[in-house]
């Protein structure tokens, strides 16, 4: 089955720690995205990558970092500089901008 | 900057009632339009999409949406909702000058009472 996997499903972080969220896709899509979902705010774009070894900041990139070393993988690091990291994080991919496919999400809680 | 607005934050309906969720976007050029749904505990999934052609598009589970270019709107409709339609609904826009990026609305939570 083709799709997007995200891990872990739940993640707890202490203040001051960096954490990395995993996103893998086997859809052979070029473009991948990270969104943050907060109640009442919809999905806000953190970072996106249209091809391997290239990525761009989205609307709320501060305090986050990404890498795109392989086509199928687009990990997101939430750094200690992110002031309010508790949220639901969604990874997505697309080919040609025709439709986005989403992973199941990771819920990050800062303790 | 492009933006997408959705008219209602939370809609509560009884089963068999008709549904219309509003969506407006702020871009004057060619757009691709989408409605996504997020059922409780499930992935975001595509309900329907509009790229070109007939402005009335049909999606899964009896949903349809109408693109009205003059009003910059893409409202979602269903003639008769079911309890299983309880979910959060997101309108999204993609424009070619925005690359492969999508702008999402804030979402509308639909609660259907049995």
Image (cartoon, coloured by chain):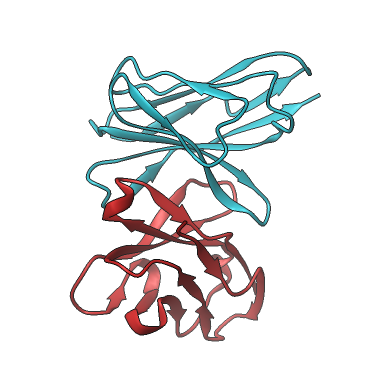
Chain colours: A cyan, B red
At which x and y percent is residue B114?
65, 75
Q: Is residue A1 visible?
A: no
Residue A31 seen: yes
Q: Residue furthest left?
A: B53
Question: At x 27% / y 79%, what residue is drawn?
Answer: B55
Rendered position, A105 above or below B73: above
Q: Seen from this angle, which residue lies furthest right?
A: A111
Residue B93 rendering spot, x and y as whole percentages: 39, 60
Q: Residue B95's image quarter?
A: bottom left
Q: Quadrant of residue B29?
A: bottom left
Query: Percent from the top left, x then y, of residue A58?
Result: 48, 38
Up-down relation of residue B86 to residue A61 (above or below): below
Left or right of residue B77: residue A95:
left
- Which quadrant is the C terminus of chain A positioned in? top right
The residue shown at (71%, 33%) is A86
Total numbered labels:
0
Image quarter hosting the N terminus of chain A:
top left
Q: Quadrant of residue B72?
A: bottom left
């Amino acid at each position: 089955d083709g799709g997007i996997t995200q891990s872990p499903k739940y993640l707890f972080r202490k203040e001051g720690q960096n954490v990395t969220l995993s996103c893998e896709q086997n859809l052979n899509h070029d473009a991948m995205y990270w969104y943050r979902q907060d109640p009442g705010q919809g999905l806000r774009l953190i970072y996106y990558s249209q091809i391997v070894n290239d990525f761009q900041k989205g609307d709320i990139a501060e305090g986050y970092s990404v890498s795109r070393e392989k086509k199928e993988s687009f990990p997101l690091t939430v750094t200690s500089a992110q002031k309010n990291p508790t949220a639901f994080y969604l990874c997505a991919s697309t080919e040609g901008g025709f439709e986005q496919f989403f992973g199941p999400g990771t819920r990050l809680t800062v303790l | 900057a492009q933006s997408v607005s959705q008219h209602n934050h939370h809609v509560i309906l009884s089963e068999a009632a008709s549904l219309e969720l509003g969506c407006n976007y702020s871009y004057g050029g060619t757009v691709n339009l989408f409605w996504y749904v997020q059922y409780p505990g499930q992935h975001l999934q595509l309900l329907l999409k509009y790229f070109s052609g007939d402005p009335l598009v049909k999606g899964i589970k009896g949903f349809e949406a109408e693109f009205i270019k003059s009003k910059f709107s893409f409202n979602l409709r269903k003639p008769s909702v079911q309890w299983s339609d309880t979910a959060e609904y997101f309108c999204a826009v993609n424009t070619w000058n925005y690359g492969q990026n999508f702008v999402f609305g804030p979402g509308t939570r639909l609660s259907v009472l049995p």
